[in-house]
Amino acid sequence: MINLTIDGVPVTVPKGTLLVEAAKTINQEIPIYCYHTKLGPAGLCRICMVEIEGMPKLQIACNTPATDGMVVHTSGERVEAARAVVLELFLVNHPLDCPICDKGGECDLQDYAMAYARGTSDVADAKLSKPKAVELGPTIVLDEERCIVCQRCVRFDDIIADEQQLVVKERGARDIIATASGRPYRHNFTGNVTELCPVGALTSRTYRFKSRPWDLNRTQTSCTQCSVGCQQFADVRDGKLLRTMLVEEDPISDGWLCDRGRYNVGFYESPDRLTQPLYRKSGSFTQIGWDDAIIIWAEAIRRAIAARGPASVGAIGGGRLTNEEAFAVQHVFRSLGVANLDWRAGLQRQATPGAHGAPLSALDGAEAIVVAGESPAERAPVFWLRLRKAALRNGARSVHERNADAARDAVKDATRVALVWDGIDPAVGKAYAQAFSGVAELATFITGEQANARGAEAMGMLPHSGPGYVSVPAGRDTTAMLDAARAGDMAMLAILGANPARNGADPEAVARALEHTKFVVVSELFMTETAALATLVLPAKGAFEKYGTTTNLVGDLLPNNASLQAPDFALSDLEMLSALAEQLGVPLPSTGEIESAVIAGVAKPPQDFTLGDDRFGTAAARARRASKILSGGGTWLHDPWLARMREEVS
Amino acid sequence: MPEGFAALLERLRPEFDALIAQYEHKRSALLPIMHVFQKHQGFVSVDAMNATAETLEITPAEVEAVVSFYTLLYRRPVGKYVLQVCRGLACAINGAEDIMAYFREKLGVGHLQTTPDGLFSYEEVECLAACDRATCMEVNLEFVYDLTPQKIDEMLAAMRAGTYPVEPMAQTQAPGPTWAVAADGEIAKGRKSPGAVAVENPDNPGGIGDASGTIMLDHLINRDVYLFGRTTERAVVDSRAVVETIEERTDRAGHGRPIGFANGGRGAEGEAPFQSIWEPNRRSSVGILTAGIGEADLRDIGVYRERGGYKQWERAVRDLRPSDVLDLAEKSSLRGRGGAAFPTGKKWSFLPADKFPRYLICNCDEAEPGTFKDHMLLEEAPHLVIEGMLLGAYGIACHHAYIYIRGEFKRGYEIFCAALDEARRAGLFGAKIFGSDYDLEITVQRGAGAYICGEETGLINSLEGKRGEPRLKPPFPAIEGLYGMPTVVNNVETLAYLVPILERGAEWFSAAGTERSKGYKIVSVSGHVRNPGNYEVPLGTTVREIIDLAGGLRPGRAFMAVQPGGGSSACIFEEHLDWPYDYESMTKAGSMLGSGAFVVFDDTTDFVNAAYNLVRFFAHESCGQCTPCREGGNWMERVLERLVHHRGVPGDNEMLLRVARSITGLNLCALGDSIEPFLKSVMLRFPDAFKSRIVETVAR
C-alpha cells in the first residue's frame, strides 16, 4: 500500500493507483474530460492538473500514480489558473449553444466552466465552423463544433467495443470525430458513446431535442431485452419514455448498455398496442370487458377439465413474465391438477446451468472462454462485451470450436474455464459438460432467449419441476403439448407472454396446433402471430409498466420497477391470474408469500444436474435460423424508429 | 480503358507483401503502402484505403484516420504537378510571400487548389529544410531552389509544354470540381452552417452548392474539409473552384499590406543559380561530418571507403564489444543533436538489461524551421549516416534498426536507399556481419508530412502505422517504445558523430567545445546572411563568428536578432553577439541551441509577420490531441493574422502574451510549449511593431 497526502489528508491506496482515483477516496473531485475509470488515462484534455510538492511543473492526475510520501494539492493558485486556461481554450471554439443542447444541465463543460472558469472571454475572433448534425449511423448524431476531442468515444470503440469504427480524422484544430468514408457507425454498443461524451457532441437520434434532463423522472429498473438483466434508468417525461441510460456502478452490466437494451423501447407507446380483451366470435375478434374475459377463460378451463381431464389443459410462457407472474401461472394451474406447464416457447431447452453455475464475475478471472453453440454476441450482447474484456484485457483465450472435444483440446491446460452454451441442443450441452467435467474451476453459463427464462424455470414453469426446482409429477413439455394439440387432444392452452407461432422451432406446426385447440388464450402487448390464432386475447402490460422481479442468466434476482403508465385497459399477467384464480376459486398466496417463494426459488441454485440434462428433454428443437433477437416478442416490429434501423442493418 | 482497381491491387500485391515483410508488425507497412498507391493512383482512393485495411487487418476507419493525419497523402485527385512553395520563416523573410503571390497570380488559384485544366495543384507548405536556398519549393516532391519570377515562368512553361524534367503525378481520375467534393461521403452530411462560404455550383446555376444543398469549400487536397472563419459573403466559382479566400478579401478591403515581408528576396538580385545540390560554400570551419561534402561524391560507396569510410564499423564488429561503443559515446560527452541535447550514452544506458528485442531508430524527420543539416547529410553523405546507424545499433546491441526519413525528402530517401543497397551488397550489415555472430537489419521508413513525427514517440507511432501523435509519458521509449519494446531514437547528426568519435577517440571529441557543451555541431545558418549554409563548428564558437562564417549581413543592413535554435527557440539580440554558441549560454540568454538552426534577422524583418509565421507553423503542425496546443495555437494564429492585417483590437497583445505563457507547461508534448519563446522574445523586444497593429479602438 502507498501512503500519500492529498490536500492535507493522509490517504492510503494500493500501489499503482492514479492520483485521480486516489483523490476520490477522500471525496475530492479532480475535474476530468478524457480520463474515464474504464478507459484509463489518455492525457489529452489537461484539465486534471494538480500540484505535487517537489515537482516544478503541474502534473496530470490521470497519469500520475501515487507514490509513497507524495504531497498533492488539488487546488491552489497554480492549479486553478491551469484549469481556467484549459476551460478558456475549450470555449474559444465551442459554440456555447447550451440553450438548445441536449446535454445542457448534465454537461461537464457547463459544470466545470461554472466551477473553475473565468467569467469573461478575451476572444475577439469568430469561432471555427465545423460540420453539425452529422448522422454517424442509425443511432448517433454528432455535432463537431461541440466536440472537445477528449476521444472517450474513440477509445471506447477501440478498447471496450473492439470495433475501431470511430476515429479522429484530420489534424490540429481541424480534427474531427468520424467513421470511414461512406461507412455508418454501427455496432451493438454505439449508444454508450452518448453517455461517455462529456459534452453535447454525441447524441442519440431518438432523444435529440426532446427534453431537458431536469424535466425527466428517473426510475432504475432491469433491462428485459435479453437474459443478462443490465440495470438501467428509464427517463420519463409527461408519461413518455424518452431514453434509457446505463447505471455506471452496476456489476451486472459492468456499466454499459447494448443498443437493443437502450433503444428498443419505442414500442411502449405504439398505436398498435392491445388495449382491450378480444374474444373470437364466429371467426373475428370482438372487444369485450375484463370481467367477461376472465369468466370466459375460467369457464373454458373448467369445461376442459370436466370433459377431458387436466391433461387436456396447458400453459406456455414465463420467460417474458416476472418471477411473480411465472409463479402465479404454475400455482393456479397446478392447483387445478394441470401438469402441462412449460416456459419454453422458442428454441432454448434449458436456462439453468445447475452445477458449476457461476456469477458473472467468474468470467473476469477465466483463463479460457469456450462458446458452445450460438455466439452470445446477439443473444446477450453485454455478456459478450464482458467476454471480450476478459479476452482483450485479461488475456483469456476465446474458443469457439466445431465440437466439444476440439474445444477441450484447444484449452487442455486451462484450469479456469468459462463455458458458455446457448441452451438449444441438449446433446451439445451434454457433450461440452462431459468434455469439461475435469476442469478444476469450471463456470458454466447459458445465454437465454428470453429475459426471465431462468426465473421461469426457478418458479416451476417446467413440466417436471415446481418452484425451487422441486420434482413434481411430470406433464407435457411445449413440444408434447403442441403435438397433442395437433392430434386434437388439447382443449385449453394458455400462452402468456410468448409468440411460438413466430419464434418456435416450427412456426407452421405451432399454427396448426393452435388451430386444432378448442380454446387458446394469449396475453400479449401486440396482435402477434400467436395472438392472431387465439380464442381470447388479453392486453398485457410491458416490463416498464409493472412491478416485480426477474432472474437473469446467472440467477441474480433483479428488480423490475414501473416507470410508465400502461395503456387503457392493459393488465399485468399477475393481475390477470389473480382475477382468474378468484374466478376459479383457487386461493392465490399473498404478495408477501409469493415474494418469499420467489426469493427461496431463486436463491438455491440446484446442484443435481448440469448442461444438457435429460430432465429438460433430449430432443433439440430444429434450429432453422440463428437468432438475431431484436427483443423477446417481436416488439421491434412496433417501433417505427427501430424498424428503420433494422432496415439499415439488413 | 484505364486499369481497374482490382487489377491494380493484384499488380501491387507482391510489392505490398515485400513492404510488410520489412516490419515486425504488419501495420507498420501502412504509410509505405499509401505511398505506393499514391504513386500509381495520383492520390489515395477510398478503395485503396479499404484494400489496405483488409491487407493489414485493421478497419477502414483506422486507415483513413492515419491518412488524414499526413499532409503528403492526398485523398482526392490532384494536378499533374503539385507545386509546394515553402512558407517557412527563412523563406518568408527572403521574399516567399512575393513568390507565392506570383504563383497565385500566374496559376489563378490559391492555396490548396487545383487549376481548372487539372495541370497544377498549388499549396503553401511549412519549412522544407532547404533554408539556405530560400526561397524554395518542391514539384512533386523534387526540390527547386532560389525561386525568381523568371524561374517560375520557365518552370510553368515547361510543365505546360510537357518538357519539365520531373515525372508528373499519375492521374487516374481528374481533379473534381468544388461541389463534387461536397457531394460524396461524410462531408456531404455536414449541414450548411451559417459560417460556410457559399459556393455556386456551375452545373446548377442559381442554385447553391450541390444537389443536397451542401455547402463546402473546395480544398483540393482535402485536408481542410471545412472553412475556418465565418463570412456570409457569396463567392462565385468556376467549375474547378477559384474561391475567394478570406485572405484575398482582406487584401482588397484595403486593410494594409497582407502577409508579406517589407523587403526581402535575394532572388531579386539575380544571383547565379547553383550547380549542385549542396554547395561547398556550406563549408565549415572544421569539416568533420561535412568534410568532402560538395567536393567528392560521397554517395558512392567506393569514394566513401577510400576516404576511410566503414573502417570504424568493421573495427567495432571485429574488435569492440557493444559496451565499448557505449563507453565511447558516454566518454565523448556527445549530446543529442536533434534539439533536446540529452547525453547520448546516458540515453542508451536507460535500456533495461533484460527486455528484448530492442530497437534503434534514426530520426531523419528534420522539420524544425530553419534546420537543414540532416537533409544535407542524407543527400550528400548517406554512407556516413549508415555507418553512424550501424555503430549506434551495435552500441545498444539491437538487431533491427530503422531510419525514419521525412516525407518531403524524396530525393534523400532515394539516395539513402541506393546507398543502403550498396552497403548491404558489400556485406556491411545483414546476417553474421564480418563473420561475427552479430546480425543487423535496417529498414527505411518514409514519413508523409507531419512535423510532429520528429518527436520521438510521435515518430514511433508513425512507424507503427498510426497517427503520428506523441504518446503519453511515462512509459518512456527506452522502456516501452516501438512495438512496446525498449527503443532508442537518435538524431542523424548524433549517430553520424559516432564515426569520428570511434576514429579519433572520445577525448578528441570532448576536447572541443566548452565545459558542458563538448564537441562539434553543424549549424544551419539562414535568413539575412550573405552565404547561408551548414557550418560545422566547435560548440562555443561565438554567435558573431557564426554570422561571419556565413558571410555576414548583406551590405547596408543592420543586425536585429538571431533565432539560434529553430522555430521553438526565442530570439537573442545584439547584446548576445559575443556569447559562445553552446547549450548553456543559449539557455542563459533566454533561448536554446536546439537543433542548431540559426536564423539571422536584419532590419528588413517585420517581426509581427515573423511571429505570425511561426505561430501558424505550430498551429498547423499541432497533432490536435491535447487542448492547450490545439486550441491555444489556433487562437493565437488567428489573432496574429489580424495583427498582420492591421486589424488588431485593444488587448490583443496582452492576450497573446498571456495565452502563450499560460499554455506553456500544460501540454502533452513539447510542441505546445514551443509557441511562446519566439513570440514572447520579439513582442517584448519590439513592442512598438506590435502596438502599431492595434488600429481599432472599439473595446471588445
Image (tube, rainbow, N blue to C red):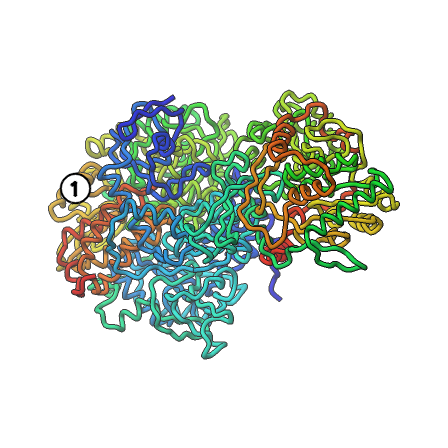
Is the residue A97 above or below the residue A85 in the image? below
Residue drawn at (43%, 46%) of the image: A151
Q: Quadrant of residue A308?
A: top right
Q: Residues within 10 Å of mark 1 (few under 14, many from 20)?
A: some
Q: Position of residue B497 (x, y in %)?
A: 32, 36
Q: Residue at x 31, y 63 (%)?
A: B147
Q: Is residue A314 left or right of residue A538?
A: right
Q: Chain of mark 1?
A: B
Name the residue at 31% across, 27% down: B330
Q: Position of residue A191 (x, y in %)?
A: 52, 48
Please tell me which residue lies in front, A238 or A622: A238
**Image quarter (top left, top right, bottom left or bottom right) of the C terminus of chain A:** bottom right
Farthest residue in the bottom direction?
Answer: B206
Could you tell me if residue A162 is visible in this image? no
Which residue is tagged 1? Answer: B589
| Residue found at the far right of this picture | A487
Q: Is residue A633 visible?
A: yes
Extreme residue in the left direction = B575
Q: Is residue B374 left or right of residue B689?
A: right
Amino acid type indicated by mark 1? Ala
